[in-house]
Amino acid sequence: MSEDCLFCKIIAGEIPSTEVYRDDEVFAFEDINPAAPTHILVIPIKCLRDITAATEEDKNTLGKMLLIANQIAHERGLTKDGFRYVINTGRDGGQTVFHLHLHIIGGRSMSWPPG
Ligand code: AMP
């Protein structure tokens, strides 16, 4: 846990969130400012500042994040019409919280390329 990390505080329950999934490696919760009807963040319990900080020892966790995201996408009925996974990375990538997170965004049609 990193002391000044917003998402670490959410995992610890120090800041409230709407939990979607939790185990000893992965946590998922509703985004506070949803960009679509479904907007959920999937994060590792381990505080990695972004996806580029991941190493060989994190590969099982990264795989699990994607499988849990798939499970949530199924549960939320997103798989029929499609949806989007996003990992914003660094300043130019639009990352604002520096604890790795996978966005699950769905429930509406989306455009490409992103802004
Ligand atoms: P990013 O811009 O990729 O770093 O995404 C950060 C996301 O965290 C944004 O979609 C925010 O709406 C979301 N967020 C920030 N604070 C909270 C919070 N307290 N609870 C839930 N989601 C949050």
Image (cartoon, rainbow, N blue to C red):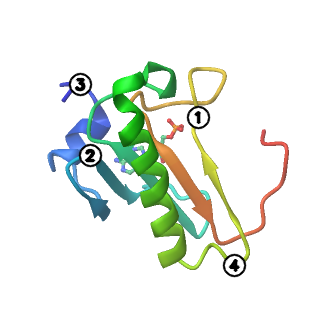
Q: Position of residue 108 (x, y in %)?
A: 71, 70
Left or right, 81 with respect to 32, comes to right
Per the rendering, the mark at residue 4 is 3
Badge 1 or badge 4: first in the primary sequence: 4
Per the rendering, the mark at residue 80 is 4
Instruction: Please tell me in which quadrant of the rendered image residue 106 appears.
Output: bottom right
Cβ atoms at labels 3 and 2 below 8 Å apart: no
Name the secondary structure under disc 2: loop
Q: Nearer the viewer, mark 3 or mark 4?
A: 4
Name the secondary structure under disc 4: loop
Kindly tell me whether mark 1's CB lies below 8 Å from ligand 1.
Answer: yes
Badge 4 or badge 2: first in the primary sequence: 2
Q: Which residue is mark 1?
A: 88
Q: Amino acid at mark 2?
A: Glu
Instruction: Please tell me in which quadrant of the rendered image residue 37 appears.
Output: bottom right
CA distance separating discs 1 and 2: 20 Å
CA distance separating discs 1 and 4: 25 Å
Q: Which residue is mark 2?
A: 25
Name the secondary structure under disc 3: loop
Out of 55 and 42, give the one closest to the viewer: 55
